[in-house]
Amino acid sequence: MIAITAAGRRFLQFAPRVLEAAQAAQLAAVAEPAERLRVAFPAGVDAVAPLMPAALATLELALSHAYPGVGVILVPTVFERLNADLRAGAVDAVLTFGVSDSEDVVSTRLGELKRVGLIPTGHPYTYRRSVPVAEFARQPLLYAPDLPASYMDPFVLADVRPLGEASLVRMPASRTSDVAGQLLTGPGITVIPAALAAALPPALKRVELDGVPSCWYYMHDRASDSRPELLAMVTLFADFTETITRAARASRR
């Protein structure tokens, strides 16, 4: 006759709890990556790009299939620290808008950067859905002189006419809210990625730019950092940028 011992009965009594604890630990291990790749992006962007978390979740899922235990965290960073934090190792990469001029930084082209004009409500362009880009480029445009050309050039339309011919309104800016504040108080208007125009406040209005040249998002990382998981993440960010741009276009329909 086979009988369950006292120890066996105790195991059966507590086995479900042990199994639940093991499953919870396994889920926690999956939910909490052992390694997090830190990607800097301009401070304040998350406030006007509400679809970024969903795009990031998709990217992380794809990355985790190839590199289990590796996650990604977006780090809002004041404009003047974007390059400095990358060089210092505070972040692993920077999501930006142009090629770095530093030899120790690798610039990888990602998805297309669709640009639109941004004006305060009440501006003469308020009731125009679109404006020729050459006309927009003749307007006073906001300009932060302390930022590298790789950040500023796309948004002062340096690829439409020589920068020396532009009417620039110089301003200090550390985050997107500084730009919005200057727009509301004047003078000057600006250009932004279409991906950031999906959730604008009523005081600001998006204007399409007819004939605007193509340009692209870029990711910067240190040339000395060749971790395969980092390189895989950089590649996946091409889909990330395409996703947030498509979502912004869909929000206009």
Image (cartoon, rainbow, N blue to C red):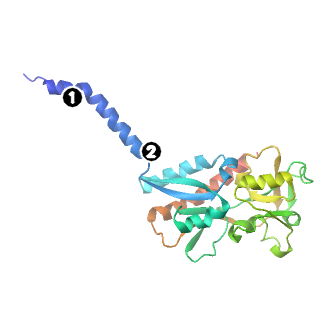
Q: Can residue 108 be seen here?
A: yes
- Does residue 4 lie above or below 198 as drawn? above
Disc 2 marks a residue whose amino acid type is Ala
Q: Between disc 2 and disc 1, whose residue precedes?
A: 1
Measuring from the top left, give residue 119's x and y in whole percent: 84, 53
Q: Can residue 162 be seen here?
A: no
Q: Is residue 171 left or right of residue 232?
A: right
Q: Residue at x 82, y 49 (%)?
A: 205
The disc at residue 192 is none
Q: Determine crowd level at label 2: few under 14, some 14-19, many 20+ residues with C-alpha closer than 10 A.
A: few
Q: Residue at x 43, y 57 (%)?
A: 66
Measuring from the top left, give residue 10's x and y in whole percent: 20, 25
Callout 2 touching callout 1 (CB < 8 Å): no
Quarter occupied by the C terminus: top right
Pick the front one: 178 or 199: 178
Quarter occupied by the N terminus: top left
Measuring from the top left, give residue 34's x and y in whole percent: 41, 52
Q: Residue at x 67, y 61 (%)?
A: 79
Q: Badge 1 is on which residue?
A: 11
Q: Is residue 252 left or right of residue 69?
A: right
Q: Residue furthest front?
A: 172
Distance from label 2 to label 1 (Cα)? 29 Å
Q: Residue at x 55, y 75 (%)?
A: 104
